[in-house]
Amino acid sequence: MRPATIKTGEEVLVRPIRPEDEPLLIKLHQALSERTVYLRYFQPLKLSQRTAHERLQRICFIDYDREMALAAEHKKEDGEPEIIAIGRLSRLRGRDEGEMAVLVDDRFQHLGLGTLLYQRLIEVARDEKLATVVSTILSENREMQAICKKLGFYLEADIDEGTVQAVLKL
């Protein structure tokens, strides 16, 4: 758990996800635009699908041997905590490779949270002795491609799939 400062000067706490975060994740998903949902999940997903208890339970109760989920939390004006971004690193079964993805509340995009979460997840991947991390990004998601490029990922387009594979050797 370490605080960080985003471009607005506001401090956020980046910490592992906890089982009691489920209600905060519901609020995060309620704040997302259709575009953000599409860019993250590669398809439109209804709010009811994204906030189903079974799905959120899998996200909040993680198997730390196989994955890590980090939440970026800030305090709202009333002092209540709010999750404004989440990042996930999942070890690919039988390989020393991990897959990474982030989701940032639309109100907090372009403030450095995606980069911050990717940096922290790369630290976790290195600590776990992974050799490579990958992210599959939709071709139109220029923001995520820019983050990956800035962090040293190699980008390769898959024209047929409409995606870009970002690969970082650790």
Image (cartoon, rainbow, N blue to C red):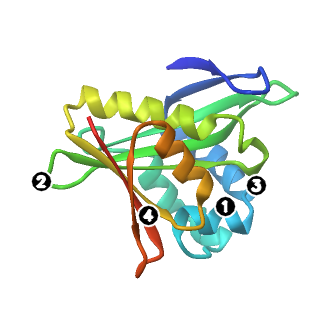
Residue under label 2, please give it.
94
Label 3 vs label 1, nearer the camera: 1
Is label 3 or label 2 in front? 2
Gap between marks 4 and 2, in whole Å? 23 Å
Q: Nearer the viewer, mark 4 or mark 2?
A: 4
Which residue lies under the disc numbered 1?
Answer: 36
**Residue matched to label 4:** 164
Could you tell me how far apart the alpha carbons at marks 1 and 4 are, in whole angstroms? Answer: 17 Å
- Amino acid beneath label 1: Thr
Nearer the observer, 109 or 11:
109
Q: Nearer the viewer, mark 1 or mark 4?
A: 4
Single out the residue that lies furthest toward the left. 94
Q: Residue at x 71, y 42 (%)?
A: 110
Kind of element beneath mark 3: loop
Q: Residue at x 60, y 57 (%)?
A: 142
Give the secondary structure at mark 2: loop
Q: Are marks 1 and 2 in contact (CB under 8 Å)?
A: no
Give coordinates of residue 140: x percent, y percent: 60, 67
Residue at image position (40%, 82%) is: 160
Element at badge 4?
strand
Image coordinates of residue 72 in percent, x first then y, are 60, 33
In 3D space, how far apart are the residues under numbered discs 4 and 3 (Cα atoms)? 26 Å
Q: Check disc 1 and report its element: helix, strand or loop.
A: helix
The answer to whether any part of residue 18 appears in the image is no
Residue 96 falls in image quadrant = top left
Mark 3 or mark 1: name the one nearer the start of the chain: 3
The answer to which of marks 3 and 2 sits earlier in the sequence is: 3
Dot 4, how many residues are within 10 Å of its Cα: few (below 14), some (14-19), or many (20+)? many
